[in-house]
Image (cartoon, rainbow, N blue to C red):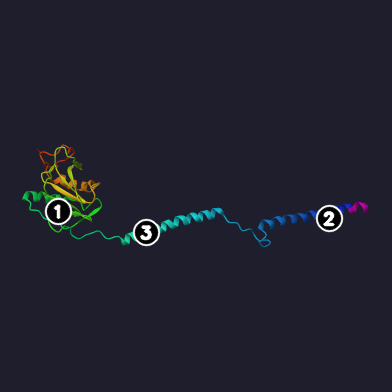
Amino acid sequence: MATGKVPSSGSASAAGKVRSSGSSVAGTVPSSGAAGVAGPVGASPVRRDPTRRSAALAATLIAVPVAVAVLLVSVFVYSADPPATDPVTMTERDLAADVAGACEAVIADLPDSAAGHARRPVTAGAEQNAAYGDPPITVECGTSLPPVRETDLVYPLSGVCWYPVAGENRTLWTTVDRVIPVTVTVPGAPAGTAQSVAPFSEAVGTNLLLRDAFPTGCTDTIAPPSVATT
């Protein structure tokens, strides 16, 4: 009986303890190795989250340009010169009573702003002159009709026919389909100046009669709604 108990006790107890102890050691060693040699025993491993790092970098890349843009806009807004409001020097013309009356109606119907430029006062002839922006775009009613041949290039703009004459650092646009000429002077190079003239066509077309004859290129002219033409 004694011989039979020794193997049973040794096999069940000793062997079981060895395995249990070995399992504990084996479980501890990998844990220590995963934490790293420099880390303290039992400390959790420190790992950087790549997702958080990318999100933080993206937020920085977005925030910096936005801050710069806000700064630049603020500098521009506070450093930009205010719109010019002083009167523009212009000359008053000696007009016949009927011409003066028609021109007064034209000037009264002009817009408060044109092509992004605010209207400004004038030094003389407020019933026949107007000005916009700086350097000023000027409008003169009751001017002279320029010499225009039948085949010259003209520009129908919003129902009114205009003829441009390029000068030094300015372009003079004059109506050639109305009995009373209106001239708009636009400063700068000739290219693109038609956009500065078109806003004045409505006031001209509403108040001034059509001429009996005008260049063949004036195909889209519009007569005043309450005036019969020949």
Provide the residue designation for mark 1. Answer: 129
Left or right, 123 with reference to 16 = left
Image quadrant in which you'd find residue 164: top left
Residue 229 rendering spot, x and y as whole percentages? 10, 39
Q: Residue 150, which numbered label?
A: none
Q: Are marks 3 and 1 in contact (CB under 8 Å)?
A: no
Image quadrant in which you'd find residue 122: bottom left
Determine the secondary structure under disc 3.
helix
The three-letter amino acid code for the residue at tag 1 is: Asn
Q: What whole-number distance in Å separates the C-alpha atoms at marks 3 and 1?
A: 38 Å
Image quadrant in which you'd find residue 25: bottom right
Q: What whole-number distance in Å separates the C-alpha atoms at marks 3 and 2?
A: 81 Å
Q: What whole-number distance in Å separates the C-alpha atoms at marks 1 and 2?
A: 117 Å
Q: Residue furthest left?
A: 96
Residue depicted at 51% across the width and 54% down the height: 55
Quarter holding the C terminus?
top left
Residue 213 forms part of the magenta stretch? no
Residue 17 rendering spot, x and y as whole percentages? 80, 56
> Which stretch is magenta?
1-6
Vertical position of residue 87 compared to residue 153: above or below: below
Provide the residue designation for mark 3. Answer: 72
Provide the residue designation for mark 2. Answer: 14
Determine the secondary structure under disc 1.
strand
Vertical position of residue 116 compared to residue 226: above or below: below
